Each structure stands twice: as C-alpha cells, then as structure tokens.
Image (spheres, grey):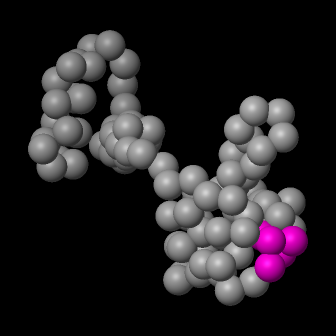
Amino acid sequence: MSKIDKTELIQKLTMGAFSANPEQLQAAVQALETKQSKRRLGTARQAAEILETCPTTVKRYRQRGLLEGIKIGQRRLRFDLDAVQRLADYGETGAQM
C-alpha cells in the first residue's frame, strides 16, 4: 500500500472524528511506519565504527542531541544504526534537539 493510499484510508477512517490537514495525516502515517519497522540497534562501539570515530565521541553526539540513545534496562545504551548511518552520510538523523 503506497503512502497516498494510506493517507486516503486514514482520511476515510477518521472522517468527522477530528480535522487534520494532509501534512498532518502524512506525518501520522510516517510515524506509524517508523514504529512498525524494526530498528537496528547497536552499541556505541558499533556506531563509532560506522562514523569512523571512537565510542566516546558517539556518546558526546548523544549529549549534544545529534544521536538518540535508547536505554535498554537501567545501564545499557543502544543507538539506532540507521540514524547513525544517516548522520555519517548526510549529517542528519532526525533526532529531536
């Protein structure tokens, strides 16, 4: 199902339930697709290999908001390797600052 089909489907399902412009609906579809897809999580060391830097720098990127760290349990920290690759390729990750 294409993104346009999904947007149309959401519009039909929500007719009258709330009002949203096409951009808001598209953002909702994109958010749902992101949640449904499996994230490739990796350690700071794995992220550092992709970025060709050291794990400490990866952790600094997290502190600055360039990368989102995902806590697994109380101590383990993982990184979305797709976001790391986007940072390496384009200088952006989509992380909230």
Magenta-drawn stretch contains 57: yes
Residue found 60% across the figure and 78% down from its top: 50
Q: Is residue 21 left or right of residue 85?
A: left
What span is in magenta? 54-58
Residue found 21% across the figure and 19% down from its top: 13
Q: Is residue 58 left or right of residue 30?
A: right
Tell me where residue 89 appears, x and y as whole percent: 53, 83
Q: Which of the two residues, 42 or 70, is positioned nearer the viewer here?
A: 42
Q: Which of the two residues, 46 or 88, is positioned nearer the viewer here?
A: 46
Residue found 74% across the figure and 41% down from its top: 71
Tell me how many marks there are. Answer: 0
Q: Is residue 14 left or right of residue 69?
A: left
Magenta-drawn stretch contains 35: no
Residue 7 position by quadrant: top left
Q: Is residue 70 above or below residue 94?
A: above
Answer yes or no: is residue 27 visible: no
Instruction: Identify the image quadrant of the C terminus.
Output: bottom right
Q: Is residue 30 above or below residue 16?
A: below
Answer yes or no: is residue 42 visible: yes
Q: Which of the two residues, 67 or 78, is positioned nearer the viewer here?
A: 78
Residue 53 position by quadrant: bottom right
Q: Is residue 17 above or below residue 61?
A: above
Residue found 71% across the figure and 38% down from its top: 72
Tell me where residue 74 appears, x and y as whole percent: 83, 33
Tell me where residue 33 appears, x and y as whole percent: 35, 43
Tell me where residue 58 appears, x and y as whole percent: 78, 70
Q: Which residue ends up furthest to the bottom in the rendered image? A: 52
Instruction: Identify the image quadrant of the N terminus.
Output: top left
